[in-house]
Structures are given as structure tokens and as C-alpha cells.
Image (cartoon, rainbow, N blue to C red):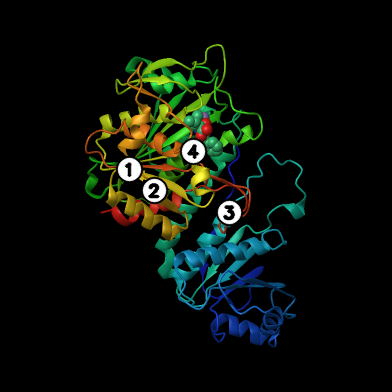
Amino acid sequence: MTPATMPAISLASVPDQFDGAVGFTVAEGSDWTGALATMDAACDGAIKRTAEAAGFDGSKGKTLLVLGAGASAPARILLAGLGAEAPSALDLNKAGASLMAEVATRGDASLTLVPHDGSAASAAALLEGAAMRAYRFDAYRTRLKDDQKQSVTTLVGACSDPASGQAMMTDVSGRVSGNFLARDLKHEPANILYPVAFAQRLKDELEPLGVEVTIIDEAQMEKEGWGALLGVGQGSVRDSAVVVMHWKGASGGVHDDPVCFVGKGVCFDTGGISIKPAGGMEDMKWDMGGAAAVSGLMKTLALRKAKANVVGLVGLVENMPAATAQRPGDIVTSLSGQTIQVLNTDAEGRLVLADVLWHAQEKYRPRFIVDLATLTGAMLVALGHEKAGVFSNDDELANQLFAASEATGEYVWRMPLGQEYNKSLDCKEADMRNIGGGRWGGSITAACFLERFIQKGQKWAHMDIAGVVWTDKPKPMVGTGATGFAVRSLDKLVQDNYEA
Ligand code: BES
Ligand code: MN
Ligand code: ZN
């Protein structure tokens, strides 16, 4: 397991002479001022002439690459349009990312980003987006040619007062590192990242940062009665495991009433005896995307020393067909004591989460629980690859999640719960069945199943991230592959609402 390397990021004053490539942001319709005007003057107006010839007017989302503008100028100068309105942090993230995407493999070792307003805050936002876009998973590419490799390894944000941005840089690099961890975990194939290997990776990553990491093994779960989770893993030669990650950062050392994040960690989902079709089954290596997000979040919180008490729990299993696998019709007793008839062994994520959610509530009495899971294919039918579904019994929590998601570009949309859906889980032979009666509204019945394991008064939100953990077409801050979805938005949820 080789982690992807994050580019080195720092803030500096605007230099007289640039090293490597340089990217400027441009407000639409503005006269060029500051460092960009200086650079253009040094090139006898070549940058402006190229921009005019190319029709680049600074409108939002547009980029321009200017090659060979002048003998003493950088060989590659880039412009990113911000539009006419004052840009948000997210706009700047996206601009930084688009600049990174333009030069990534062009041979420059470094990229300097210069914001239109010269501020440290804008430079930091550009750096965050650029660093996000620099993610590559090349661990198993032993024959990559030099021109296929990413050349840019250093990112510099040039601004007028770099010293004032140092605290921001700690947060930026914490968020990007956490996102990278989540992406690495999703990319690792299931022969490498099986449950116990995942658990060990979390110990290795997080213990040195001051996170308490506890592994609950199969023997302990058998003794305690985690029947729903263990039933899913029983067809695999790999042991199941639950990992509890506790970050005790609250000021004054008060560590009661934590906030909890719970992740589905199905390291591979074949469907089990209710086996999936072969086409596209390889995607199910990222059926641990919820667990990856929770793990990345814990890394971010620790790196930026969040002043909050946060517990992350992940349920790690492999869902395999085997002589020992659970069968359709089997009845299991969950940790909560409720019995479940397993009518489809491919509806396994909810079985894993049922026990982890119950444990989180019994042990930690959390202020809220957010669970994340690649739970249903139906989520892709409903919201596609653009937004994740949020199901919640608490309007305030749902609204906080929505605000954090809009600010970070990790978009979510609220979906319903309700008795009309819930009753389709009623069962003649056990307390409930693990699938609803028909195929419609499958994401909602899955959420209703989880709700049956939420105790009275417990604030809770479920995020079905099946459509957003992986992307085949480039998104602003992701090339292709794993997105690391929810690390940055959940970090913001904690930072904006739950830090003293
Ligand atoms: N991991 C899948 C859901 C999934 C499918 C995520 C496609 C991403 C892409 C989950 O375990 C599953 O198999 N769900 C079933 C539930 C059904 C049997 C009620 C599904 O969605 O088909
Ligand atoms: Mn499944
Ligand atoms: Zn699954």
C-alpha cells in the first residue's frame, strides 16, 4: 500500500522572478492590476494580446494557457477566470484546481498561484483546490513514462501577507491529506485492502496523530452479539473488524457527548449468495467509501487539531458467496436484539450499519450521528453522480449538512423517511426483513431500515453516497477515480457548528 503523495504547499510573497509555471486569477471585465499587470508589462503586453485573440475575458470557469510570452517570463503562464461577482472560497478552489489540471504533466516542477486580490485567504483557497486536483493513484503503475507522470510537486500561493495565512495553511493541508487518505483507501484493490488490513492501516495512519484507535475483532463481536454484521462477513476467509477512532480535541479536556460518524466498509461486495452480475462488479471495491470518508475525516480533524470530541466508527467486512455464506431466508439477531430475515444477501450494508450504529449509541450517547454508506444503486437513479442523498430525523442537522456541502462543492440533497415506506420492512417471520417489498424507492426503504436502529431522541442523518464516491469523468477538484467525497464537508460541519 503506497499512499499518494500530496504536493508541498506554502504561501510566499510575490517573487520578482517566478520558478516553474505561474497561474493568475482574473476577474471578468476588470483592468489587470498587481502581479498580473507587472508580468504583462514585462512581456510587452503579450499575455493580454493572447487573451484577446483567444477570447478569454475572465468569465467564470474559463482558463487560458499562454506559452512563451517573453524571453524572461515563465514558459507557461496560465489564467483562470473568476467571473464578474466576488468569488467564494469554492470558486477559488475550483479556479486553483483548473490551473493545476492545465499544467499537471507539462514538465514544470512547481506552480505558483497568484490571486487577483493578492490576499493570503484567496491564495490559500487556490492552493486547496490545486492540491485537491493533484491527486494521483499511480501505486501499481510500474511502467509509467516520464511524460505521463505528474511533474508538478510544489505549489506556492503568492500573496502580500503570507505570514497572516499560516493557520489557514494547517487547515488546508489537513483537509487535503484527509481527502487523499479517503481516495487511497477506495483505490486499493480488495486483495490488498481487506478488513483487517484496513484496520491496521488506520492504526498506522492515525495513532501517530493522537487519535485513539481501537479494533473490535470477530471474537469480541461474537461474544457481544453483533449478529447482523457477522452474518455478512461469514462467507469470507477474511475476518471482519470494527474500528473505533476517537479524537479528543475538545477544549478544557471535556470528552463527554461526542459527535459520531459511522461508515459502511464493505471491502468488496459480490452480493454474496444473491450474487451480482459480472459486468462492473469491480466497482464494488469502493463499497467501503463510507468508511473511507470517516477515516479521512478523522485524519483531517487530527491534523488541524480540531477543538471537538469526535468518534468515527467503521464496520469492515467482505461480502462473499461461499459454502459458509449466509443464505437468503436466514434470520440473524442484531446487536440491538431485533431479529432480521435476510431476504437478499446483497442488501448487506444496512446489516453492517445496524450493529455499528447501535454500538455507537450504547457506548457514546452522541450529540448526533451521521452515517455514510454506498448503500443503494437506487441512489444513482434518483440523484445521479452529482449529489448524495441525506435522510435525517433532525432538520437542524440536515440544514447544517446542506450548508457545509454547498460551501465545499460536495453536494447533497434531502430525501424523505416515513411510515409509509418503513412498513414495507415488516416481516412475518422476524422483527423485520432486510429489503422492502418492491423495487421502487429503494434508497428510502434502506434508510428506513437504518432508522429502526436509531434510539428515541437520537439526532441522526444518513448519507447515501453510492453515486458520488467515484467518478469516470473529471470533476473540478477530481480528475477521475475516487473523489474522497464528504471529508471536506464533514470537516466543515464540525468546524462551523461543534468546535468550542
Ligand atoms: N453496494 C451496493 C449498492 C451500490 C450499487 C453502490 C451500485 C454503488 C453502485 C449495495 O450493497 C447493494 O447491493 N444494494 C442493493 C440493494 C437491493 C438488494 C435491495 C441494490 O442497490 O441493488
Ligand atoms: Mn450489496
Ligand atoms: Zn454494498
* Alpha carbons under labels 3 and 1: distance apart: 27 Å
Q: Nearer the viewer, mark 4 or mark 3?
A: 4
**Point 33% across, 22% down: residue:** 335
Amino acid at pointer 2: Leu
329, above or below 438, in the image: above
First along the sequence among labels 4 and 1? 1
Residue 308: x %, y % from top left: 30, 48
State yes or no: discs 2 and 1 in contact (Cβ < 8 Å).
yes
Q: Residues within 10 Å of mark 1 (few under 14, many from 20)?
A: many
Q: Residues within 10 Å of mark 3 (few under 14, many from 20)?
A: many
- Residue under label 2: 301
- Residue under label 3: 478
Residue at the extreme top: 323
* Alpha carbons under labels 2 and 3: distance apart: 22 Å
Comparing 114 with 86, the one in front is: 86
- Residue under label 1: 310
* Alpha carbons under labels 2 and 4: distance apart: 23 Å
- Residue under label 4: 374
Residue 237: x %, y % from top left: 55, 17
* Alpha carbons under labels 4 and 3: distance apart: 19 Å
Amino acid at pointer 3: Val
In terms of secondary structure, where does tag 4 sit? loop
Q: Which mark is residue 496?
A: none
In terms of secondary structure, where does tag 1 sit? strand
First along the sequence among labels 3 and 1? 1
Amino acid at pointer 1: Val
Q: Is mark 4 within 8 Å of ligand 1?
A: yes
Comparing 101 with 332, the one in front is: 332
First along the sequence among labels 2 and 1? 2
**Point 60% across, 30% down: residue:** 192
First along the sequence among labels 2 and 4? 2
